[in-house]
Amino acid sequence: MSLIVMKFGGSSVGTTERMDRVAQRIIEKKLQGDSVVVVVSAMGDTTDELIDKASAINENPPAREMDMLLSTGEQISVALLSMAIHKLGHEARSYTGWQAGIVTEELHAKAKISDIDPARLFASLDAGNIVIVAGFQGMTADGEITTLGRGGSDTTAVALAAAIKADVCEIYTDVDGIYSTDPRVVVCARKLNVISYDEMLELAHLGAAVLHPRAVEYAKHYNVNLVVRSSFTHNEGTLVREDAEMEQGIVVRGIAVDKNVVRISVLGVEDVPGVLAKMFGALASNGIDVDIIVQSGVQDGKADFSFTVSLSDRGRAIEVLSSIKAEVPYREATYEENLAKVSIVGAGMVSNPGVAATMFEAISSVGVSINMVSTSEIRLSCVISAEPVKEVVRALHTAYGLDTTETAFVGGPKDRR
Amino acid sequence: MSLIVMKFGGSSVGTTERMDRVAQRIIEKKLQGDSVVVVVSAMGDTTDELIDKASAINENPPAREMDMLLSTGEQISVALLSMAIHKLGHEARSYTGWQAGIVTEELHAKAKISDIDPARLFASLDAGNIVIVAGFQGMTADGEITTLGRGGSDTTAVALAAAIKADVCEIYTDVDGIYSTDPRVVVCARKLNVISYDEMLELAHLGAAVLHPRAVEYAKHYNVNLVVRSSFTHNEGTLVREDAEMEQGIVVRGIAVDKNVVRISVLGVEDVPGVLAKMFGALASNGIDVDIIVQSGVQDGKADFSFTVSLSDRGRAIEVLSSIKAEVPYREATYEENLAKVSIVGAGMVSNPGVAATMFEAISSVGVSINMVSTSEIRLSCVISAEPVKEVVRALHTAYGLDTTETAFVGGPKDRR
């Protein structure tokens, strides 16, 4: 008999039929004798529809009122899921974020959870109910409704699991676990049985959209056992935990691709002290996230810099650079699109010095040149041209011994609809 | 400088354009220097759409979860209305029922308001905000979300007006006040400047759908000045208050028609003591509301009874009568449809003995016979055939001196769309 948190995303409850299937899934757990707390996101396109309604009235609505509006999406989901469970003859009670005792800091649209008082949920569990909590939302100490921002429902689930000391927090999604790489790119991608928090964080930041990095950080901090699994199959899924053993002979856990990348080059920058701090300080204070930074050698007292930003920040980055040209003199600023960042991730990399050489070899073996390189303790990223990225990923997958003979679950249900 | 509650119904905020117009209307008040608390219903068809979603999942959903679901309709309205006011450059804050301090008894789907703590609303008004409160909803002392049932938003507005001691509670609707009778039937219907609570209660119970009887009762109990007016024009509207002076020479305030009426006749009932109590007791305990009751004279120890019920209760009433035939022996039970109840209402009737005779004369003057009669202190109702009802109302309107030469506002905007 365990205490379990189950989290279902918006696409898992997007239709009446799917809602029914999720209700059955929850009841199966309950019938095993487990105590179940469920966290749900807004159904399908509900959030987008609410945003459209707001935009029609006010293009720049106050964040407080957006939270008031958007929090109804999850409230609708929890009420309907509770009704679906009742129809199947089981007792359930739905709760908003504030009813579930989720207290956040006073920041609208992207509040952080500051405290959870689980007394009411425990009382409801003790009464034999399946407990259903609206994800993505909470309340400030002053009684204002807040939302948690992107990835909010994952974070709600992990935070609740920590607060009630759940045995496991299961994240149900439309893929059946974390893969060594995107199975739509590499058919023989390997489903991972286990992965460490740090590895998962690197993969999540690199665009493996299954789990939000914030939820992984929360899980790591409170040491919550996370399982990522499919809401459509009963396959085992992937366990995310502190120490994850590597399989024999494998050093790299996974390969991720991020196509949301632009390289900006600033050429002929005067090489005086403080110039880098000024440039990147100005970018940061304008909310532009800079990823890889490369400086080439200095010639005649001038240096060339390159860095990457996301596609949506490109225009603003060039503007910021123009605006500081008086303080940070340079010859010209250019940008390059149609790039991709390919990354290998594995906790064992740090103690295996040949890993980087294998990556460079595999990339050059398919005739592709490397544009930029960056490393962390458990990650190695190369920026290359976007066009040959699938061949590169396949070559890397084979080079690191990740290929499996099992047929992978190719694509999510979105592809099969 | 006054403290004003303004209530807008679902059709007043049904589209973006209407929402904008309501926002402007509210800002006009604010610019006059008044403090404004606004109560809003769910937009247009939102509530029906939510009910459809629930029905698709569970035909008999738990009332608690329905309240959880339906309360989102008003939460969406208040957030959007606040955004519309912000766009026009004024400060507004939206509040759910529980945030507004509205405490109800522990009864889902038709809770009564048991207490209101207006501290948070006062603080928000003091900060210079336009305060917007979700109608139709509250919270129990245990933190469960409840809804107030039909007419709930009117009741929220009146209860808030009482709690904050507002100078007036304005109910905005799609007609511009209370009329002496339906202006679609009688072109020269008179818009009333003033009407008493009791008269309004009689008219509301008789199907004049502008104000819910529960809200009028609440207003009477707390002596709240109510104004019914149009959200589309700046006409003065009708004031509902304790003592309403009659115009010189006019005894009847208004004429109402109710077509939702069936006459049931029970013939040859054995005239023994307790037989009436058994019959009407059985009907009442099956939730059937009996209106007018008539007993004809007794012959050979047998009596004939007639009573009226609403159309939707007809079948069940006949069933209940069959089920008690052993205890209450009778020859047969029949029913008659295509009837209408025409009522005259006026606080001055009690001291004017000729009122009933005038009614009977007016009805017979258009060749219609009267089927049943019932009276209260301020009301006189006749059941007649439904077919000539418009002629009867016109004759009564003239007979009681209610005709005006002004052109009435014929029909609501629903007719003009």
Image (cartoon, coloured by chain):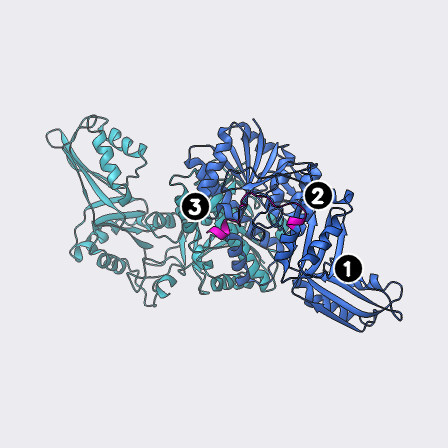
Chain colours: A cyan, B blue
Say what amino acid the circle numbered 3 marks: Thr
Estimate the spatial distance between the alpha carbons at disc 2 and disc 1, rounded to whole Å.
Answer: 26 Å
Q: Quadrant of the C terminus of chain A?
A: bottom left
**What residue is drawn where x is 80% and y is 71%?**
B325
Which residue was labeled with disc 2? B251
Q: Which mark is residue A161?
A: none
Query: In the rendered view, would you say B163 is above or below B318?
Result: above
The answer to whether residue B105 is visible is: no
A342 sits to left or right of A406? left
Label 2, secondary structure: give it: loop
Residue A223: x and y in percent read 48, 47
Q: Which mark is residue B293?
A: 1
Measure the alpha-carbon separation of dots 3 and 1: 49 Å
In this view, the residue in front, A289 or A213, is: A289
Q: Earlier in the sequence, mark 3 or mark 1?
A: 3
Magenta region includes residue A351: no
B333 relative to A159 in the view: left or right: right
The crowd level at tag 2 (other Cα within 10 Å; few <14, some 14-19, many 20+) is: many
Rendered view: B403 above or below B123: below
- Choose the circle earlier in sequence order: 2 or 1: 2
Q: Position of residue B293 (x, y in %)?
A: 77, 59
Residue type indicated by callout 2: Val
Mark 1, other Cα within 10 Å: few <14 / some 14–19 / many ≥20: some
Q: Pinpoint the chain carrying mark 2.
A: B
Asked if disc 3 and disc 1 are in contact, CB closer than 8 Å, the reply is no
Judged by depth in the image, the label closer to the viewer, 2 or 1, is 2
Task: Give the residue type at disc 1.
Answer: Ile
Q: Is disc 3 in the same subunit as disc 2? A: yes
Span shown in magenta: B397-417
